[in-house]
Image: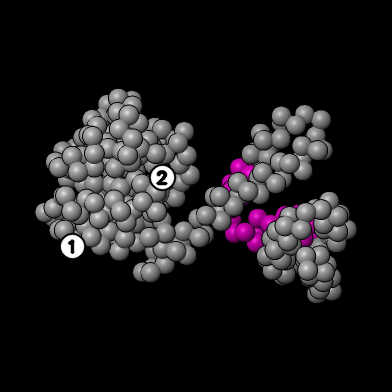
């Protein structure tokens, strides 16, 4: 029978108390770890610790004293300074320290590696705003950097997303386009839809359902097989109509850039003349 608390006996220090820490703290506790939290603002660390039945420390150096594993849940632009500060005050003695940046590899923790820490990184492929407390990680994909991160991903019930060496920037760009880019598209679509619907308050729910259905299609099949819409049909009139409604140059350029990608995907199903006509329309509509 497998252990339902795979981190039993581990002492994990979370440095930071933002969205990731708020999601990780209860998940780590549920997996059997003893969690201690430290943050730049101690009151936030105390509040999170109370909520998840963890302990808190006044600063990072205190939090990591007895930790067997340290997870730096800090913004990317604070990572280097936190690593340097901990390296000055906290010898590693073979313990593991991870960061959660999807953009930076283990090299971001070089000062800690020189101080005797085993450095690694783990990035959940999951949007985690500050409201993400108590988020479950079962089945979630994790990009991992080494043995410690793979073990932690498994302990949280996640799945490993193996990357080629030196490709963290490409991975992070892709994740940003899908997650944050879809939010930008959603907001642009919502603004236009609210002009069309009699009940503007329904726009968010209606388009969230549409986005969810698109994601479900992508989970089952390829983007080319899931493709629908006017570009896929070669519907020149609809594309012209859309462009006419986009009065802001930035919006037109975004529409054309996305439509050109859709045109590439649609190429096998469209007649050559129709493909050329769409390509010419999209080229002419680009802002000069």
Residue 50 falls left or right of residue 112: right
Residue at x 68%, y 40% (from the top left corner): 207
Q: Residue at x 75, y 31 (%)?
A: 200
Give above or below for 285 relative to 45.
below
Badge 2 local density, few (<14 within 10 Å), some, or many (20+)? few
Where disc 1 sits, the SS reads: helix
Residue annotated with mark 1: 114
Q: Secondary structure at mark 2?
A: loop
Location of residue 180 in the rendering, given as x and y in whole percent from the top left corner = 56, 50
- In percent of width and height, residue 120 lies at 27, 57
The magenta stretch spans residue 216: yes
Residue 179 to residue 253: above or below: above
Residue bounds of the magenta highlight? 211-233
Which residue is farthest right? 237
Q: 160 or 48: which is nearer to us?
A: 48
Classify 10 Å Cα crowding around label 1: few (below 14), some (14-19), many (20 and above): few
Quadrant of the rendering where the C terminus is positioned: bottom right
């Amino acid at each position: 029978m497998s252990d339902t608390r795979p981190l039993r006996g581990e002492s994990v220090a979370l440095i930071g108390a933002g969205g990731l820490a708020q999601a990780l703290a209860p998940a780590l506790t549920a997996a059997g770890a003893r969690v201690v939290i430290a943050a730049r603002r101690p009151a936030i660390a105390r509040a999170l610790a109370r909520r998840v039945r963890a302990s808190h420390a006044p600063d990072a150096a205190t939090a990591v004293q007895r930790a067997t594993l340290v997870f730096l849940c800090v913004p990317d632009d604070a990572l280097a300074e936190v690593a340097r500060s901990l390296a000055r005050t906290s010898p590693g003695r073979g313990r593991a320290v991870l960061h959660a940046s999807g953009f930076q590899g283990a090299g971001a923790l070089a000062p800690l590696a020189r101080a005797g820490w085993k450095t690694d990184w783990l990035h959940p492929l999951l949007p985690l705003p500050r409201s993400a407390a108590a988020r479950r990680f079962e089945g979630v994909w994790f990009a991992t950097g080494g043995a410690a991160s793979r073990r932690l991903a498994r302990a949280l019930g996640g799945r490993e997303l193996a990357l080629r060496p030196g490709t963290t920037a490409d991975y992070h760009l892709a994740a940003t386009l899908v997650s944050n880019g879809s939010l930008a598209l959603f907001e642009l679509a919502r603004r236009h839809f609210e002009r069309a619907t009699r009940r503007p308050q329904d726009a968010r729910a209606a388009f969230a359902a549409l986005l969810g259905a698109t994601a479900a299609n992508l989970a089952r099949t390829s983007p080319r097989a899931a493709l629908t819409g006017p570009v896929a049909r070669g519907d020149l009139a609809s594309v012209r109509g859309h462009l006419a409604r986009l009065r802001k140059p930035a919006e037109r350029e975004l529409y054309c850039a996305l439509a050109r990608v859709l045109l590439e995907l649609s190429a096998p199903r469209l007649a050559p003349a129709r493909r050329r006509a769409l390509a010419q329309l999209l080229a002419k509509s680009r802002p000069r």
